[in-house]
Image (cartoon, grey):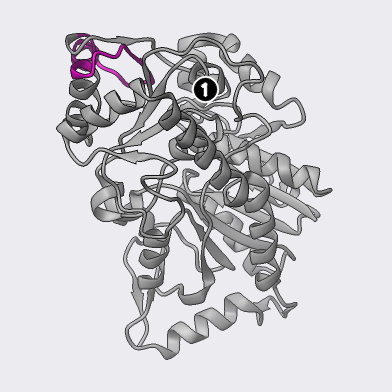
Amino acid sequence: MNIVYFTHSLQSCWNHGNAHFLRGVLRELQAKGHKVQAYEPEGAWSLENLLKDHSEEGLEPWREAYPELSSTRFGPKADLEELVEGADLVIVHEWNEHDLVAKLGRLRSRGVPFTLVFHDTHHRAVSDPKSMRAYDLSAYDGVLAFGEALSEVYRGWGWGDRVFTWHEAADIRHFHPPVEEGERKGLVWIGNWGEGERTKELKEYLFLPARAAGLGLDVYGVRYHETAKATVRRYGGHYHGWLANAEAPRIFARHLATIHVPRRYYTKLLPGIPTIRVFEALACGIPLLCAPWDDAEHLFRPGTDYLIGEDEAAMTKALRDVAGDPSLRQSLIDHGLETIRARHTCAHRADELLGIVATLKPLPFRGGVGVGPVATRRLELIDSPHASIPSPEGEGRRYA
C-alpha cells in the first residue's frame, strides 16, 4: 500500500507529543512493506520553535533515532494532486490548516482514487469545537480518534460507524528499558506547562508529594514562563528545559519513578484517554504513578501496571512506598511492560490501521459523483432529521 500522511511535523516534537506515535507507526508500516511518505507544511509552529530555540542541532536526536524516516515540507502553492499521486491511503492530522483539509477533500470528491481519513489526537473537539467543526470533512471516508470519548464527539456530529477509536501507543523499537541498568535516583516529569489547565494538579500530585517524600525532581518541557520556572524551584525541583522526545528513554533510565499528571480536559471532558506519556513510561520500564484519571476503556491495569495517588497524601505515600520497596518497583516495571508489549505497541496500531482501512475501501466514482462510502454516509445523514456534519462555516449543516 502507498500511504501518504500530512502531519503538522514529523521532524519536531516541540510541544507536539503526537510526534512519538506518528514516527513509530509510520516506521512499523514501512517494516510491513508499505510505502510511506510524510508531508509537513512550511512554517509549522512546532518546527519553527524548535529551530529558534535549538537550531539544526535540535533535530539530531530524531535523525539518529529514525534514520529510515523522512518528511518533505510543502508550501501553500504546492500541487496537492501531485503530492498524493499514486496514494492508496491519505491521512490528514488535525493540526493542519483548514484550507489544506478542504482541498484534499475536494480532490477526493473529484474521484481521485484514494481512501481519505482525518486523524484527531487532541482535545480541541471539546475545548475549541468551533474550530474543529470548521474543518470541511464532507468528502472524507472516515475519522481516526485517539480515544473512545473523542469518537463519541464525532458520532454526535453524525459520523456514526465512520469514526474509529485508534489509540496512541509506544514505539518499542526505541522506547524500551535500558540494556544495562545504572544508578537510578529521584523523580522525573516530562511535560509541557501549557496555559494553566493543570497548574493546580501539578502542585497537588507532583510538586508537593515529591518534596514531602524527600525525592529529588527533574522537570523537562517547554512553554514554562518565569512564574512556572519559579514554581518548580520553590518546591525543590530542577527545570532542564526542552527534551527531545527521542531522548526520553535515556532520561527515564536515570530515575527511580515518574508521574503522569493529565490535563484537565482528559479527566473532565474527554475521560479515559491516556496521553503518550503513559505508554512511553511503561514501555521504558520505569515505575509510573498517576494523578487520578479514569481508564474507562480498560487499556491498563490500575494498581498493577501503575499506582494512582487519589490526593496529595496518597501520592506522597505511594512515592515513599516505591522509593523504599524494590520489589514493588520491579512488579510495576514487569506488569507495565507486559501490558504494553501485549496490547499497546506501534506495531499493534499499524495492524489496527490496516484493518480499519480495509473496511473503508472506497468504491469507484461515476461521473465525478461519489457512490462509495462517502456518498453513502452523506445519504444516511440526509435521511436523519437530527444529524449534522462539520461544514466549512463552522456550524453543523442540518438536513431535514
Classed neighbour count for the residue bearing mark 1: other residues with Cα under 10 Å, few (<14), some (14–19), many (≥20): some
Residue pushed farthest right? 33
Q: Is residue 357 above or below residue 328?
A: below
- Percent x, y of residue 119: 52, 53
Is residue 320 left or right of 273 when viewed as pictured? left
User: Is residue 140 among what the camera can see?
Assistant: no
Is residue 121 left or right of 210 when viewed as pictured? right
Residue carrying label 1: 248
Q: Name the residue nearer the viewer: 174 or 197.
A: 174
Q: Quadrant of the C terminus?
A: bottom left
Q: Name the residue nearer the viewer: 368 or 377.
A: 377
Residue stretch in magenta:
211-233
* Residue at the image point whose x is 69% and y is 45% from the top: 79
* Residue at the image point whose x is 43% and y is 24% from the top: 326
Q: Which picture quadrant has residue 375?
A: bottom right
> How many labels, in total?
1
User: Is residue 247 among what the camera can see?
Assistant: yes
Q: Quadrant of the N terminus?
A: bottom right
